[in-house]
Amino acid sequence: MIDTHTHIYDEAFADDADLIVSRALEAGVTHVILPNVDASTVDKMRAFAHKYPTFCSMMMGIHPTEIGENYQTELAVFDAEIQKRADDYVAIGEIGLDLYWDKTYLEQQKRAFEYQVDVAIQLDKPICIHSREAFHEIVDSLKKFSSAKLRGVFHCFTGTPEMAVQIARLGDFYYGIGGPATYKNARFIDQMPQIPLSRILLETDAPYLPPVPHRGKRNEPSYVVYVAQKLAQVYNISLSELEKQVNQNVKTLFFAHHSNIF
Ligand SMILES: [Zn+2]
């Protein structure tokens, strides 16, 4: 099983990273993909991936909540990194728009998002999208690009099947499903089988959004198993069937050019 979105290089794991990694391996989580957040997290992420090289892959991007007045400085760091070490990164992420916390920098967020999407297309890499209270704005931005060249994942997807259809028209997109799928009030999960399993990825977004029965605590990659169990249940298939299909999805999206990972 692969946790396609986890921030385990975060301070939250500073004291017990070894334990978290071994717990993941024990639970059958053999690989994780680390999203970058901003200029300050690049070195931390790279150091973590360097320490556990067969366990980690990395993405490079600037998160929308880190886009503000000085967003050009953030993008310069992104640029330098991606130009120098493009092969180190399996995707551009996480990038997107977040209007939940603050709408002040919507214009800057859009510019930074579209700039990074453009780089992804030039480098033929998938994108990992963070969309919070900004679905229509994200769709408007992505419509500016050719759907034949766009591919990636809507991370932490909790939308309706109608939203999934809209997304599918924009390009070759997958849906990252995490802890919220296990929440009691998660209405989207009952409609999930309307989305083909060939489009589903598993993720934790650790240390955030822990699944039931760990709500309110720190999330970690081993907990992705709870998300997988929930999905196997709603798709009415065995856990091993689910695992086989989502592993194939991960390979197709992120590792088509990195066969050595598996
Ligand atoms: Zn994230």
Image (cartoon, grey):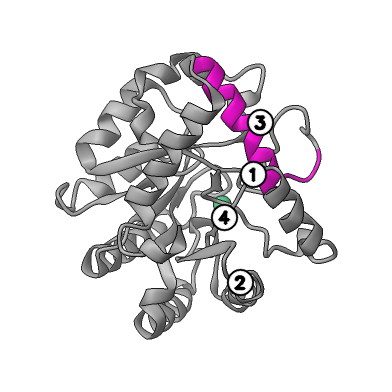
- Nearer the camera: disc 2 or disc 4: 4
Q: Secondary structure at mark 1?
A: loop
Residue of label 2: 41
Q: Mark 4, mark 1: which one is toward the viewer? A: 1
Q: Earlier in the sequence, mark 3 or mark 2?
A: 2
Magenta range is: 217-234
| Spatial CA span between label 3 and label 1 | 12 Å
Residue 92 vs 132, above or below: the answer is below
Pointer 2 local density, CA inside 10 Å: few below 14, some 14–19, many at least 20 = some
Q: Quick check: is 218 in the magenta stretch?
A: yes
Look at the image and tell me in which quarter the C terminus lies. bottom left
Q: CA distance from mark 3 to mark 2?
A: 28 Å
Which mark sits nearer the N-terminus, 2 or 1? Answer: 1
| Dots 3, 2 in contact, CB < 8 A | no
From the image, tell me which residue sits under label 4.
Answer: 32
Residue at point 39% right, 85% down?
84
Query: What's under tag 2, amino acid-wise?
Result: Thr
Instruction: Please name which of the two marks, 3 or 1, marks the residue nearer to the observer.
Output: 1
Query: Along the polypeptide, which appears first: circle 3 or circle 1?
Result: 1
Q: Residue at x 33, y 56 (%)?
A: 126
Q: Main secondary structure of the magenta part?
A: helix
Q: Nearer the viewer, mark 3 or mark 2?
A: 3
The stretch drawn in magenta includes residue 134: no
Can residue 207 be seen? no
Task: Return the residue at label 3.
Answer: 226
**Which three-letter amino acid code belongs to the residue tagged 4?**
Val
Viewer-nearest residue: 136 or 9: 9
The residue that disc 1 covers is 28
In the image, taking residue 237 as reference, residue 92 lies left or right, namely: left
Question: Gap between marks 4 and 3, in whole Å?
Answer: 16 Å
